[in-house]
Amino acid sequence: DAGVTQSPTHLIKTRGQQVTLRCSPKSGHDTVSWYQQALGQGPQFIFQYYEEEERQRGNFPDRFSGHQFPNYSSELNVNALLLGDSALYLCASSRTGTSVSDTQYFGPGTRLTVL
Amino acid sequence: QKEVEQDPGPLSVPEGAIVSLNCTYSNSAFQYFMWYRQYSRKGPELLMYTYSSGNKEDGRFTAQVDKSSKYISLFIRDSQPSDSATYLCAMSAWGGYNKLIFGAGTRLAVHP
């Protein structure tokens, strides 16, 4: 089991550009969540995708959008990049179900630097 | 006030010490509690997952949840230099698979 994978590992962009980050969930998982982690802070929830639809959204502007594909993989898109978007972007996968044991497993993250 | 408060440390202890890490929270709807370990420039790794109140033990790690006090703890026995990392508490109201609210993380250094 490869676990949660993310690409690319690192990315450098300039202000105003657009970026796409990718995530493949752990085998057997159908739900993907995205988090932003600024340096020295805990991860902050951006949104969650399930059955190819955005199910929940955190307090992030519309510049942040996403997509989930039929194979459960997901993309995070950020438009009109700002310096403050520089962070580690984490993807977490899980299985939506009724078991109390279902929880989220994180990928290694994509480090985005905006210059 | 943040929903989840966690002392950022850093916490420095000698090898073999018992480490106590804590979080407090304000939202009484939280029922699912997790501890993640994060090494520098890596993704968080799930350590412990507890539903509702009580204790859970896994090897050198013990997680405690006191919902009446809105307080959770992680204890590490016989700490090792390899335990040096940032420890993040996380919580959810609707299930561990759902939106997680994280603390800021506590940096732990275990020195030989």
Image (cartoon, rainbow, N blue to C red):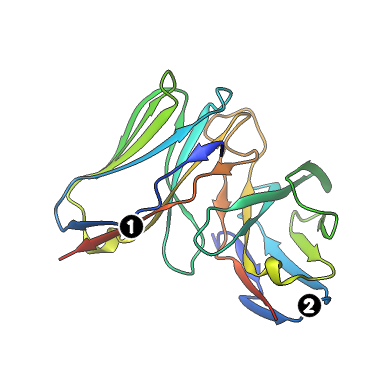
- Category of crowding for the residue at label 2, using alpha-carbon neighbours closer than 10 angstroms: few (below 14), some (14–19), many (at least 20): some
Residue at the image position 81 percent from the left and 45 percent from the top = A54
Residue A1, quarter of picture = bottom right
Residue B99, horizontal then vertical, whole percent:
65, 40
The outermost residue toward the top is: B68
Chain identity of mark 2: A
Query: How far is mark 1 from mark 2, CA to CA?
Result: 33 Å
Residues A41 and B76: in front is A41
The circle drawn on residue B89 is none
Q: Which residue is mark 1?
A: B10
Residue at the image position 75 percent from the left and 53 percent from the top = A72
Q: In this figure, what is the number of numbered marks? A: 2
The outermost residue toward the front is: B1
Residue A89, horizontal then vertical, whole percent:
64, 63
Residues A67 and A70: in front is A67
Q: Quadrant of the C terminus of chain B?
A: bottom left
Residue A11, horizontal then vertical, whole percent:
67, 79
Label 2: element kind:
loop
Q: On the picture, is A18 further left or further right than B93? A: right
Label 1: element kind:
loop
Does residue A28 show up? no
Q: Amino acid at mark 1?
A: Pro
Q: On the picture, is A105 further left or further right than B8? A: right
Q: On the picture, is B38 further left or further right than A63? A: left
Does residue B25 show up? yes
Vertical relation: B29 (above or below) A8: above
Tell me if label 1 and label 2 are in contact, CB under 8 Å: no
Q: Which residue is mark 2?
A: A15
